[in-house]
Image: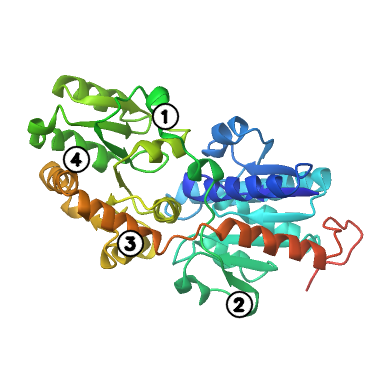
């Protein structure tokens, strides 16, 4: 069995695809999973580390760019279609799974018209442009939230939740102390702003140190900054004299979550799926420019059930962040309650459901995903 997982660009798109790949390999070790993305997306460096082959498309995003870049992106869409055709002809997949992002668009659509079974994962309450278009064609849509179902044909849309990687679920705290050079027994704050980092979170956390000096010997930080701010943030921690480890990117997210007493992060769908599955208390700082303001809506859901605290990006500063950290540090019973509440909306079974649907879809097609002589669907 051969499976193509297409898309990426950000961790929010890529990591659910990796979760599906892991589950497929768990079911049948002989399954071949091939990822398709772009050379400038996060998938280019993460997928090879996870041991999967990856093919690249000449694709760029169209939404939210300048007119000149938009024209270039449209031209590259034609090139990505050529690339997609060659990949499908070479791989001959039994199914193509789109995980979101512009790198999934041409390949998933072309696979559909070449009579390959197709499905997409929608992680957010408001779908992006690519998935809105693909949803009209593909065989199956797997949605994370009830709210997104209305954007797709109901008869082929399933509410599954967002898949979480096995390595995230099985992180070892003992390994984390060794991997990240952290001290056992200290209260640990894990901070990250998505796969590329977030400048507003990095800036606020550095400022927060000025309001936490009395806790310097009792807490430590594990902070993923992104490549852009790494040197400046690391130097700020060094000057302030706080313990911890600063890194541009975290590959061992299971261990990062395992060692964290609290998490400070954006409120992307994949991050929230991980937090709620693991039951981690969190301080959420939604990305203010997310489509449909979905990150703030996602965060409010957790706040309403007592699973998280939220600081809107527009209100974020070091003092406010330090105050929230201090409250959670001092109040263990609050942290325990937040963790319990978080787990009530976690969906640890999401990945199994999605793979069950994928296998059923392949079975319905007779196991003949690639049909070069078949008729295109109309």
Label 1, label 4: how many angstroms apart (C-alpha)?
Answer: 29 Å
Label 4, label 3: how many angstroms apart (C-alpha)?
Answer: 27 Å
**Rendered-image quadrant of the C terminus:** bottom right
Residue 204: numbered disc:
4
> How far across and how far down the image is residue 79, in percent?
68, 46
Would you say 204 lies left or right of 275 here? Answer: left
Q: Earlier in the sequence, mark 1 or mark 2?
A: 2
Label 2, label 3: how many angstroms apart (C-alpha)?
Answer: 32 Å
Label 1, label 2: how many angstroms apart (C-alpha)?
Answer: 46 Å
Q: Secondary structure at mark 4?
A: helix
> How far across and how far down the image is residue 206, in percent?
19, 33
Residue 55: numbered disc:
none
Q: Nearer the viewer, mark 1 or mark 2?
A: 1
Label 1, label 3: how many angstroms apart (C-alpha)?
Answer: 26 Å
The residue beneath circle 2 is: 153
Q: Are marks 2 and 3 in contact (CB under 8 Å)?
A: no
Q: Are marks 2 and 4 in contact (CB under 8 Å)?
A: no
The residue beneath circle 1 is: 174
Other residues around mark 2 within 10 Å, as few (<14) / some (14–19) / many (≥20): few
> How far across and how far down the image is residue 351, in percent?
59, 56
Q: Earlier in the sequence, mark 2 or mark 4?
A: 2
Q: Nearer the viewer, residue 285 or 314?
A: 285
């Amino acid at each position: 069995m051969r499976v193509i997982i297409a898309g990426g660009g950000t961790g929010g798109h890529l990591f659910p695809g990796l979760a599906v790949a892991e589950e497929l390999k768990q079911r049948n070790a002989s399954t071949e999973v091939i990822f398709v993305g772009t050379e400038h997306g996060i998938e280019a460096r993460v997928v090879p580390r996870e041991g999967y082959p990856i093919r690249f498309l000449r694709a760029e995003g169209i939404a939210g760019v300048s007119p000149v870049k938009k024209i270039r992106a449209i031209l590259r869409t034609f090139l990505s279609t050529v690339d997609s055709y060659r990949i499908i002809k070479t791989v001959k997949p039994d199914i193509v799974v789109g995980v979101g992002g512009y790198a999934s668009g041409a390949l998933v659509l072309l696979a559909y018209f070449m009579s390959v079974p197709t499905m997409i994962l929608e992680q957010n309450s408001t779908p992006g442009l690519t998935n809105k278009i693909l949803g009209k064609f593909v065989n199956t849509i797997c949605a994370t939230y009830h709210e997104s179902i209305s954007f797709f044909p109901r008869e082929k849309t399933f509410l599954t939740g967002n898949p979480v990687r096995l390595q995230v679920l099985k992180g070892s705290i003992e390994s984390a102390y060794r991997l990240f050079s952290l001290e056992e027994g200290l209260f640990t704050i894990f901070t990250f702003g998505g796969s590329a980092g977030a400048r507003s979170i990095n800036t606020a956390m550095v400022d927060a140190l000025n309001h936490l000096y009395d806790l310097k010997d009792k807490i430590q930080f594990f902070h993923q900054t992104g490549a852009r701010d790494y040197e400046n943030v690391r130097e700020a921690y060094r000057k302030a004299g706080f313990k911890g480890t600063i890194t541009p990117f975290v590959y061992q997210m299971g261990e990062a979550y395992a060692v964290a007493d609290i998490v400070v992060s954006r409120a992307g769908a994949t991050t929230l799926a991980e937090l709620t599955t693991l039951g981690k208390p969190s301080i959420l700082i939604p990305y203010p420019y997310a489509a449909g303001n979905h990150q703030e809506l996602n965060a409010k859901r957790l706040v309403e059930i007592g699973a998280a605290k939220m600081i809107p990006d527009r209100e974020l500063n070091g003092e406010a962040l330090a105050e929230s950290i201090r409250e959670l540090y001092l109040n263990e019973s609050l942290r325990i309650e937040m963790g319990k509440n978080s787990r009530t909306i976690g969906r640890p079974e999401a990945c199994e459901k999605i793979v069950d649907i994928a296998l059923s879809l392949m079975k319905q097609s007779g196991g003949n995903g690639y049909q070069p002589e078949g008729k295109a669907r109309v």
